[in-house]
Image (cartoon, rainbow, N blue to C red):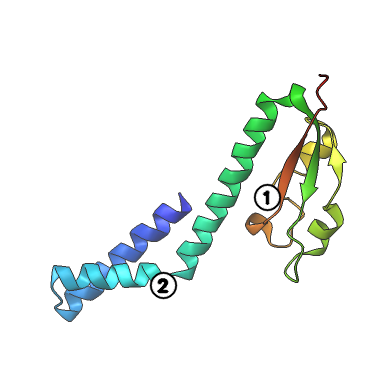
């Protein structure tokens, strides 16, 4: 909804501005497309949606395959942009649906980057008897 609202406002603002400047519809559309391509706010919103969707998709797989998963491991991207909470959580293992698992869903609630968290949970498969 946030992206939709921001996009609608940007389109409206651009349309009003174009009419005031006497631009053609083609010029107005091209100007809007140029602005959208450079929009950091929309890019940021899209990153948030992507991060949440990615985490939800992985979580669904974990739920559907819980009996085949030995543990979940928190994996942080370890670089200079990694925040302290994510760095501290990196490598922690826990069982599916445990309180610790639910506290470490991604994007991680304690991440300094908030919804822009780059961390993931990795499923560690149970050893199979052959």
Where 94 sits versus 46, above or below? above
How far, Cα to Cα, is label 2 from label 1? 25 Å
Crowd band around label 2 with a 10 angstrom C-alpha radius: few (<14), some (14–19), many (20+) = few
Mark 1 lies on residue = 107
Mark 2 lies on residue = 38
Q: Which mark is residue 118?
A: none
| Callout count | 2
Do tag 2 and tag 1 residues touch (Cβ < 8 Å)? no
Front one among 128 and 48? 128
Residue 11, given in percent of the width and then of the height, sits at 30, 63
Query: Which quarter of the figure has residue 27?
Result: bottom left
Where 108 sits versus 27, above or below? above
Front one among 128 and 82? 128
Front one among 22 and 36? 36
Most extreme residue toward the top is 130
Residue 8, given in percent of the width and then of the height, sits at 34, 58
Where 69 sits versus 88, above or below? above
In this picture, residue 19 sits left or right of residue 14 = left
Residue found 83% across the figure and 27% down from its top: 127
Crowd band around label 1 with a 10 angstrom C-alpha radius: few (<14), some (14–19), many (20+) = many
Query: Which quarter of the figure has residue 55?
Result: top right
Secondary structure at numbered mark 2: helix
Residue found 41% across the figure and 60% down from its top: 6
Looking at the rendered image, the quarter that the C terminus falls into is top right
Residue found 66% across the figure and 36% down from its top: 59
Where 97 sits versus 84, above or below? above
Q: Earlier in the sequence, mark 2 or mark 1?
A: 2
Secondary structure at numbered mark 1: loop
Residue 99, given in percent of the width and then of the height, sits at 83, 34
Residue 108, given in percent of the width and then of the height, sits at 73, 50
């Amino acid at each position: 909804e946030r992206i939709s609202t921001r996009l609608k406002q940007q389109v409206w603002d651009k349309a009003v501005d174009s009419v005031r400047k006497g631009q053609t519809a083609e010029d107005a559309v091209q100007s809007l497309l140029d602005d959208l391509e450079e929009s950091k706010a929309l890019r940021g919103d899209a990153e948030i949606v992507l991060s949440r969707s990615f985490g939800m998709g992985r979580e669904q797989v974990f739920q559907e395959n819980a009996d085949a998963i030995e543990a979940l491991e928190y994996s942080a991207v370890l670089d200079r942009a990694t925040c302290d909470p994510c760095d501290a959580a990196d490598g922690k293992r826990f069982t599916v649906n445990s309180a610790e698992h639910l506290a470490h869903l991604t994007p991680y609630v304690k991440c300094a980057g908030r919804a822009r968290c780059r961390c993931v949970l990795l499923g560690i498969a149970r050893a199979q008897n052959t």
